[in-house]
Image (spheres, helix red, strand yellow):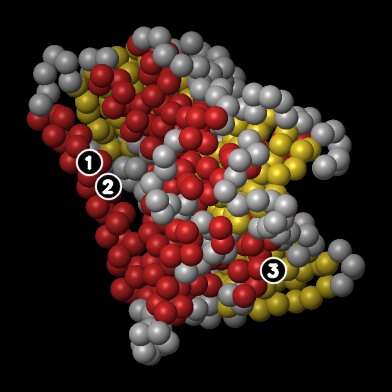
C-alpha cells in the first residue's frame, strides 16, 4: 500500500495551495481530485465568471464609445464569448496540471507530489480509499487535509435542471444568451451574473430580492450606486418580494412573487438562475464513521484542525468565508501547523474582496454596518471620484473612496470601501496596514503614483488629518469627514 506524509482531498484553490506548501517541507504529498483541477476557483466559479465579467465590460465599453468612433451596434456572438471563457478555464487548468507534471519530473528526495484522479473516502484517520476509472486503491497517510469545497445551495421547491432553471454550475450549459432571465438571490454571485447578462444587452434581467435592497451586508451608499446602474441597464429588482413558486412550464420559467404589501404577481422568463448561497461538501467522505465532529453547518474546526487530530479542513468546506484567497490562506496555514510553526495567526480581518459589478466594488476590513454591529466608534472620510484625476482621465467619475478609522488619536484603519473604476488598485496596501495595526500617517505623506485611484485614498487620509488638498467646507457634497459615536449618532 502506498504511503504518504500528507493526503490532500480536493484540488481546488485551497487543496492545491496546501499541497504546494507541503512540498516546501520536503514531504511526500498526494493530491486527490475527483473532477476538475482548480475546483470552483477555475471552472463554474471564480475564473470563469470573471472572464465573463471582463468580456461584459468590453461590451459595455463598445456601447459607450460607439458613437464617438462611428461604430455600428456591436453584434454579440454567444459562442465566440463562451469559447473565450472556456479558453481561460483551460489555460488555468493546463497551467496547474503542467506545474505538477514538471514537479514530478524533478522528483527527488525533496520533492514528491502525486496528483490522482478519483473520489476519496476516508476508511480510517490514516487510510483513504480512492475510486477511479482504474479501480479502487487505498493509501496510507500520516495527515489528511479535507479541501472538498462547496456546491450551490438548491431549494427543495425549485426544480433545478441546470438547463432552464440553473445554479452557477449550469451557466456553462447555456447555448445562447436568454432573452429574459430571473435571478433568485441578490447576494454577490447573483448580482455579478445580473451585471454580466445585462451588460451584454441581450437579456432582460430580473432579480428577486427579499429585502428592500440588494447586497444587504453592504453599506447603503455603496448599494445605491450599484442599484442605480443596474436599473439604468434595464435590470428589474423585485424588492421586498418572496418567491412563492418557481416552475418549468412549456420549457420556460414561471414564477410567482408575493410583495410585502400582499400583492401577488406571476412572471414568465426564459431562464432562471438560483443563487442562494453555497453548502460545504462534507458528506460521503466517511467523516462521521471515523469520529470527525460535525454540526449542521459542516465540520467543526479549531484553526483548521478537526476533532480528529491528524485531519484538517480548509477552504469552502469550513463554511466560513468562501473565497479563493481565504481557501489558499487556510490551506497553507494548515500545512504550516502540521509540519512546522505558522509565522502568523490565522486572521480574517484584513481580507480584501472585490465584487465584480458595475462599477467594481473593492473592500478590506469593516464597513459601516459591521463597525456599528460591533459597537465600534469610528471616524469615516469619503472622497468622490470626481476629485481624482485618474477617474477624470477615464471619463468616468462615478464612485467614491470611503475609509473608516478608530475614533481616537491613533486613527487606526478599520476598513476601506472603494466603488468605481480600478477600485481594487489600493486594497493590498491598506490590508497590510490593517494587519500591521497601523494608523494613517504613513499614507498621508507617501508619494503615490499619479494619476491613480489610490490618490483618492490618500486624500481621505489627509481629510482625517485636516490637511486635504480640497476642503470639505467648500465641497461638502463631494467629500466628508464624520464621526460615528454610539447608536445612530453621526456628527
Ligand atoms: C460563480 C462563482 C464566482 C466566484 N467568484 C469568486 C471571486 O471572484 N473571488 C474569490 O475569491 N472567490 C470567488 N468564488 C468562490 C471561490 O471559487 C471558492 O471560495 C473557492 O473555489 C473555494 O476553494 P476550495 O479549494 O475550498 O473548494 P473548491 O474550489 O470547491 O474545490 C474543491 C475540490 O474538491 C473536489 N472534491 C470534492 N469532493 C471530493 C472527493 N470526495 N474526492 C476528491 N475530490 C473531491 C471537487 O471536485 C473540487 O475540485 C466564486 C465562486 C463561484 C461559484
Pointer 2: what residue?
93
Comparing 489 with 287, the one in front is 489
- The residue that mark 3 highlights is 237
Tag shown at residue 80: none
Task: Residue 141 in the image: state x and y as whole percent.
Answer: 33, 15
Q: Quadrant of residue 446?
A: top left
| Nearest the eye: 142 or 392 | 392
Q: Residues within 10 Å of mark 2 (few under 14, many from 20)?
A: some
Residue 461 screen position, x and y as percent: 58, 39
Disc 1 + disc 2, Cβ < 8 Å? yes
Mark 2 CB near ligand 1 (8 Å cut) = no
> From what the image shows, is residue 394 above or below residue 254?
above
**Residue 31 visible, this angle:** yes
* Circle 1 residue: 97
Badge 2 marks a residue whose secondary structure is: helix
Question: Taking 197 as reference, is 299 above or below it?
Answer: above
Question: How far, Cα to Cα, is label 1 from label 2?
Answer: 6 Å
For residue 278, above or below residue 8: below
**Viewed as shown, does residue 17 lie left or right of 321?**
left
Amino acid at each position: 500500500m502506498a504511503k504518504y506524509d500528507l493526503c490532500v482531498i480536493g484540488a481546488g484553490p485551497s487543496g492545491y495551495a496546501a499541497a504546494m506548501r507541503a512540498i516546501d517541507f520536503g514531504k511526500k504529498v498526494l493530491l486527490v481530485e475527483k473532477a476538475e483541477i482548480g475546483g470552483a476557483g477555475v471552472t463554474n466559479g471564480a475564473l470563469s465568471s470573471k472572464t465573463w465579467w471582463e468580456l461584459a465590460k468590453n461590451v459595455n465599453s463598445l456601447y459607450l464609445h460607439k458613437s464617438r468612433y462611428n461604430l455600428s451596434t456591436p453584434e454579440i456572438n454567444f459562442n465566440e464569448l463562451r469559447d473565450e471563457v472556456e479558453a481561460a478555464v483551460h489555460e488555468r487548468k493546463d497551467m496547474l496540471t503542467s506545474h505538477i507534471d514538471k514537479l514530478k519530473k524533478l522528483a527527488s528526495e525533496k520533492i514528491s507530489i502525486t496528483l490522482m484522479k478519483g473520489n476519496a473516502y476516508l476508511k480510517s484517520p490514516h487510510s483513504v480509499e480512492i475510486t477511479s476509472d482504474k479501480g479502487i486503491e487505498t493509501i496510507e497517510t500520516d495527515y489528511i487535509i479535507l479541501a472538498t469545497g462547496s456546491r450551490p445551495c438548491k431549494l427543495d421547491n425549485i426544480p433545478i435542471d441546470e438547463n432552464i432553471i440553473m445554479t452557477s454550475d449550469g451557466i456553462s450549459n447555456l447555448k445562447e444568451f436568454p432573452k429574459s432571465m430571473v435571478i433568485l438571490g441578490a447576494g454577490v454571485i447573483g448580482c455579478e451574473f445580473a451585471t454580466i447578462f445585462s451588460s451584454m444587452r441581450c437579456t432582460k434581467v430580473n432579480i428577486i430580492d427579499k429585502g428592500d435592497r440588494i447586497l444587504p451586508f453592504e453599506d447603503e451608499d455603496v448599494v445605491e450606486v450599484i442599484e442605480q446602474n443596474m436599473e439604468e441597464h434595464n435590470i428589474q429588482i423585485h424588492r421586498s418580494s418572496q418567491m412563492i413558486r418557481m416552475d418549468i412550464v412549456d420549457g420556460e420559467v414561471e414564477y410567482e412573487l408575493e410583495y410585502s404589501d400582499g400583492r401577488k404577481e406571476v412572471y414568465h422568463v426564459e431562464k432562471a438562475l438560483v443563487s442562494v448561497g453555497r453548502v460545504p461538501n462534507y458528506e460521503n467522505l466517511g467523516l462521521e464513521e471515523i469520529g470527525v465532529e460535525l454540526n449542521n453547518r459542516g465540520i467543526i474546526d479549531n484553526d483548521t484542525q478537526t476533532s480528529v487530530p491528524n485531519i484538517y479542513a480548509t477552504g469552502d468546506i469550513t463554511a466560513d468565508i468562501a473565497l479563493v484567497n481565504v481557501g489558499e490562506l487556510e490551506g497553507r496555514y494548515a500545512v504550516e501547523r502540521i509540519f512546522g510553526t505558522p509565522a502568523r495567526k490565522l486572521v480574517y480581518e484584513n481580507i480584501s474582496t472585490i465584487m465584480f459589478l458595475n462599477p467594481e466594488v473593492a473592500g478590506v476590513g469593516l464597513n459601516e454596518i459591521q463597525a456599528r454591529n460591533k459597537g465600534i466608534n469610528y471616524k469615516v472620510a469619503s472622497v468622490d471620484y470626481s476629485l481624482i484625476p485618474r477617474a477624470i482621465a477615464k471619463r468616468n467619475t462615478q464612485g467614491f473612496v470611503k475609509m473608516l478609522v478608530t475614533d481616537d488619536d491613533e486613527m487606526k484603519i478599520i476598513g476601506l470601501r472603494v466603488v468605481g473604476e480600478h477600485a481594487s488598485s489600493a486594497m493590498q496596501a491598506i490590508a497590510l496596514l490593517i494587519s500591521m495595526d497601523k494608523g494613517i500617517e504613513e499614507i498621508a505623506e507617501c508619494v503615490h503614483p499619479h494619476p491613480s485611484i489610490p490618490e483618492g485614498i490618500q486624500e481621505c487620509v489627509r481629510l482625517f488629518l485636516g490637511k486635504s488638498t480640497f476642503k470639505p467646507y467648500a465641497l461638502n457634497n463631494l467629500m466628508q469627514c464624520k464621526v460615528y459615536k454610539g447608536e445612530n449618532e453621526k456628527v
